[in-house]
Amino acid sequence: MLLDIFDPKAAPKPIGIDLGTTHSVVAHVRDGRPVAITTCDGGPLLPSVVHYGDHGQVLVGRTAESYRERDPERTIASVKRFMGRGAGDAQLQALGTYKFAVPRSVEEAKVVQFDLGTESRSAVEVSAEILKSLKQSATEQLRSVGGAVITVPAYFDDAQRQATRDAARLAGIDVLRLLNEPTAAALAYGLETKSSGTFAIYDLGGGTFDITILHLEDGVFQVKSTGGDSALGGDDMDRAIAETLLRGMGFDVPAQAPKAVIGLVLAAAREAKHRLTDVERVVVELPKNGGGDVSLNIERSEFEAWIAPLLERTGRAARRALRDAGLVAAGLDGVILVGGATRVPRVRSYVGELFGREPLSDIDPDLVVAYGAALQADQLGRDSGETLLLDVLPLSLGVETMGGAVDRILPRNTTIPVGAKATFTTYADNQTGFELHIVQGERDLARDCRSLAHFTLKGIPPLPAGHARLEVSFHVDENSLLKVKARELGTGVEQEVEVKPSYGLSDEQVEQMLIDALDHGEEDFELRRLAEGRVEAARVIAATNKALGADADLLAAGEEVEIRRTLTLLDQAILPNSPATASRIQALTQTLDDLTHAWAGRRMDRAFASALAGQDLTSVASRVEHARGVDAHLEEHKKSSA
Amino acid sequence: MANPFETLGLVPTFALEAAVLEQRQRDLNRALHPDRHAQKSAAERRVALSRSMDVNQAYRSLRDPTSRAEALFELLGVDSLAERTATDPTLLGEMLEQRELLDEVRRNKDATRLATLKANMIAREGELVTELGSAFDPLLPVGTGAVPTSSRDPHVLSAQRLLTELRYVRRFTEEVAAIEDEL
């Protein structure tokens, strides 16, 4: 290996982060291979535990973990279980050491707040502390850290995903992509073994379960279906053990035991679970309620009986995912185990029975997800990568119709990016507005699904019921972000919203948290905007120059002169001593963007034609002919999206 | 939006092999997916996104035999539903009967009977798809600028009838899936 020579202008290196329920890992790609970065704890695994000290200091990792018994209420573990959840969520009822703040308003009830005694913290803020620590470790090792791919359970809904994005933003991390954990694992496996075929990835982590069916061929990782349960994992196994132990200690209602005792017993339960991997029986010594000690036995067979209902839930999700993929278990080429909870022998044997084959776990199940995230971050950092991930929507998207039913516009397991349209009509005479309620989930009634957004299309002329026609289009981009557009077809009245799930924290709140975190908030913010503007401009300049080199022949007369003139201006604006403001740089970047739009369409047609080259000559010819009309198509596109 | 066959550069046909369709989706996404243009300008990423969306949407409609049939009807310039002919009463009666059987299975949580009902319907779906292929064959290829196919063409009528039946069978198998989740 070459010596790492310090270079202040070193290119920022992209990283991959597995933000796990129990552990978190950060990795990067070196010489084409994923490597885990040593965290502040001295190893690759950072316990996802945050302790808030009495004097404002924040500890993360193993040192924080040591406070779990001493100061349980100010020590937050498994925060991932609370991401995107409100104060009324069933997760809050599970056995644990948390103390939740009592919401004082409906607004406050939207976000779980941990009561630390003197103050409170949201799950987003707690997660941000873990991310900051990981970023810090990466910066120490790589010197300059670029964007990050952060993994999330495939079955996370949009509120949980948005909460994760917000946590990254608070930690000052530029998110390149939220990648689904099982897909990340498949990427690491696929690139390591250079295999092809159809695989099931069974991912049982600390707090979440995912099952993904994925087909790998010619470097394209295509997710066929995904399913799971975002509140099911190793933590539930610990709780099953802990409840029995607490009863044995004389706490007839386990949840009412003191928090410090629960903390102690959960730790003992976790250790017992680990030991039961190798031995048939463990003996746990614990203090008895009211004084004295008690020694309690746990047989492996008892433990296996307790977790049987949990495994049955994973089996149900797995069968559904197979059916959605149009497959039977025998049609798979392999089953891959991911997540720490798959170390439990009964989980392995259950998966073996479920799929009728021995599962694979060649890559460390604790690291494989971070490896995949790092590989994806590396791929997104260049255009010439050999692999492509085609992911799917984990949950159906739809709108609420009359009577509270859901009309699904995009069903789960649709490959993204994708769009779809549906037409609705009015149900009352002279209705001049449409109320649209966008929901996510598989249930038939809107109130049982996750509510994503409400919006109203106004200004429709009064018409008899059923005469106005409302066309609703859904657009989901490569980041799974949903845009909804509604248009009344008779009048052309239209409205577009970018759907950002309202899980509780508003944009302004996150912005304020960011400013609060900085010493010279406003000022730093402007500097950051300038730095970001320069980076984006440099990227666009490089991309445009490269395009000019390759496809200048596709430029229309006059286009090239304008493009080159703007390029020169932008080039000057980002010189080190240029006085250009962030706004000026952004405006020029935007101009260049507008000037190259039509040309970009022609370049994409060329890419399309060459993708089909030699495959089906007649259809290529017709397509290329059609492609000549691309400028007209773009005009139309501009009009319809204006 | 353009016809899905055109979007994917495929010759319109009903008997489309799943492997061919998937290969095409992969090849086109390799060229057009926004991740392959992550370092390009915003304009290019936008165009890539819009193209990739069209490809995936077209893939989705061609993968499903009912929407594939609808896309062919659209190319032929005829409605996918027969205009004046009501649904065959024999088919309706039979489907009602099957529905009742399904309700009974659901009440009794009878997984074995459910599996049998499912297997029968899936076999029937397969037959219908084959028959639809034969019904569409004489109607294709669609000539450019040709007069729209007559909606009274016997092949059109036969394809419409088969599609209606396929929709019923589809709805039935979806119901079966929902019950499987419950059991």
Image (cartoon, coloured by chain):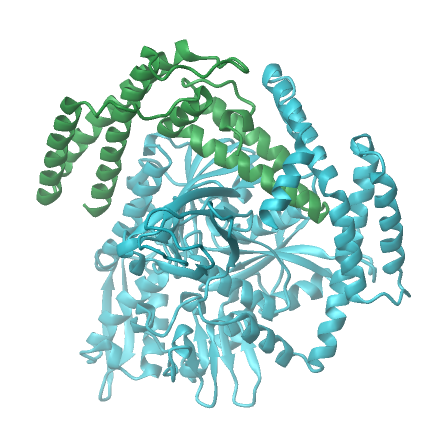
Chain colours: A cyan, B green
Q: Nearer the viewer, residue A87 or A387?
A: A87
* Location of residue A183 in the rendering, given as x and y in whole percent from the top left corner: 49, 46
Q: Measuring 22% from the left and 27% from the top, which residue is drawn there? A: B121
* Location of residue A624 in the rendering, given as x and y in whole percent from the top left corner: 66, 24
* Location of residue A25 in the rendering, given as x and y in whole percent from the top left corner: 55, 60
In the rendered structure, the answer to whether residue A138 lies left or right of residue B111 reads right
Q: Is residue B75 visible?
A: yes
Number of marks drawn? 0
Q: Measuring 43% from the left and 84% from the top, which residue is drawn there? A: A71
Q: Nearer the viewer, residue A126 or B166?
A: B166
Q: Measuring 25% from the left and 25% from the top, which residue is drawn there? A: B165
Q: Measuring 31% from the left and 42% from the top, which residue is drawn there? A: A320
* Location of residue A50 in the rendering, given as x and y in whole percent from the top left corner: 50, 75
In the rendered structure, the answer to whether residue B15 lies left or right of residue B177 reads right
Residue A637 found in image quarter: top right
Q: Residue furthest top?
A: B138
Q: Nearer the viewer, residue A245 or A214?
A: A214
Question: Does B111 appear above or below A610?
Answer: below
Q: Nearer the viewer, residue B79 or A321?
A: B79
Question: Does A496 appear above or below A70?
Answer: above
Question: Does A640 appear above or below A70?
Answer: above
In the rendered structure, the answer to whether residue B45 lies left or right of residue A62 reads right
In the rendered structure, the answer to whether residue B114 lies left or right of residue A540 reads left
Q: Is residue A233 visible?
A: no
Question: Does B180 appear above or below A250?
Answer: above
